[in-house]
Amino acid sequence: MPAKATTTPAAPAETGGLKAGDPAPEIEVQTDAGEPFKLSDLRGKDVILYFYPKADTPGCTTESCQFRDESKAIGKKNAVVVGVSPDTTAAQAKFKTKYGLPFTLLADDEHKVAESYGVWKEKSMYGKKYMGVERTTFLIGPDGKIKKVFNKVKPDGHAKEVLAEL
């Protein structure tokens, strides 16, 4: 049975979420490969932590493939990319394989990570309200503190925007 996702809150996500200078909440969840993941294991590098609503949908595919295409340039800046969505481990693995994504995807199927980062929000589509991930990226410094938050991200061109901040 997969391990439950756990996080350590760093700021009251309900009141607007995290901002630059805040410590990034710890993440303990499974990767696309079913392995345990801890954000703190990436200390010493910049981490591009991007939240997307659903694997293998048009906007999420555009965003993920552009991070894939910029991954060599990102790596040269001592940074890593980590994607998070409320999909299962199996769905993340399929998405990663289908598009040749060279970075870790996290399975936040209980949306605990999204909640701790303040990106699990009420959304509306065709007049229906539902809860889901608001596309957001956190640039986390080598010290584990948030350097920049990109809110309400537009998928096309976002990877270059984040790369410019490194």
Image (cartoon, grey):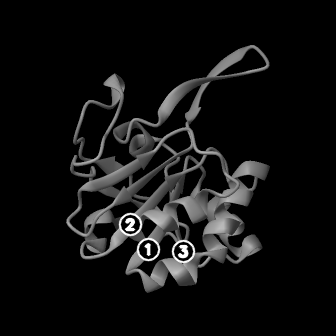
Instruction: Give x and y (percent) for residue 70.
Output: 60, 75
What amino acid type should be assigned to the residue bearing mark 1?
Val
Q: Mark 1 points at which residue?
A: 80
Helix, strand, or loop for circle 1? strand
Q: Residues at badges 3 and 2 in contact (C-beta under 8 Å)?
A: no
Q: Residue at x 29, y 53 (%)?
A: 146
The picture quadrant where one finds residue 49 is bottom left
Viewport quadrant of the C terminus: bottom left
Q: Residues at badges 1 and 2 in contact (C-beta under 8 Å)?
A: yes
Dot 2: few (<14), some (14–19), or many (≥20) neighbours within 10 Å?
Answer: many
What amino acid type should be assigned to the residue bearing mark 3?
Phe
Looking at the picture, tell me which residue is in the foreground, 47 or 103.
47
Of pointers 3 and 2, the one earlier in the residue sequence? 2
Q: Residue at x 61, y 68 (%)?
A: 67
Labelled disc at residue 103: 3
What amino acid type should be assigned to the residue bearing mark 2?
Val
Dot 1: few (<14), some (14–19), or many (≥20) neighbours within 10 Å?
Answer: many
Looking at the picture, tell me which residue is in the foreground, 59 or 55.
59
The picture quadrant where one finds residue 88 is bottom right
The picture quadrant where one finds residue 11 is top left
Determine the CA span between mark 3 and mark 2: 11 Å
As drawn, the residue found furthest toward the top would be 127
Instruction: Give x and y (percent) for residue 40.
Output: 25, 66
Q: Name the residue under label 2.
A: 47
Determine the CA span between mark 3 and mark 1: 8 Å
Instruction: Give x and y (percent) for residue 51.
Output: 52, 50
Helix, strand, or loop for circle 3? loop
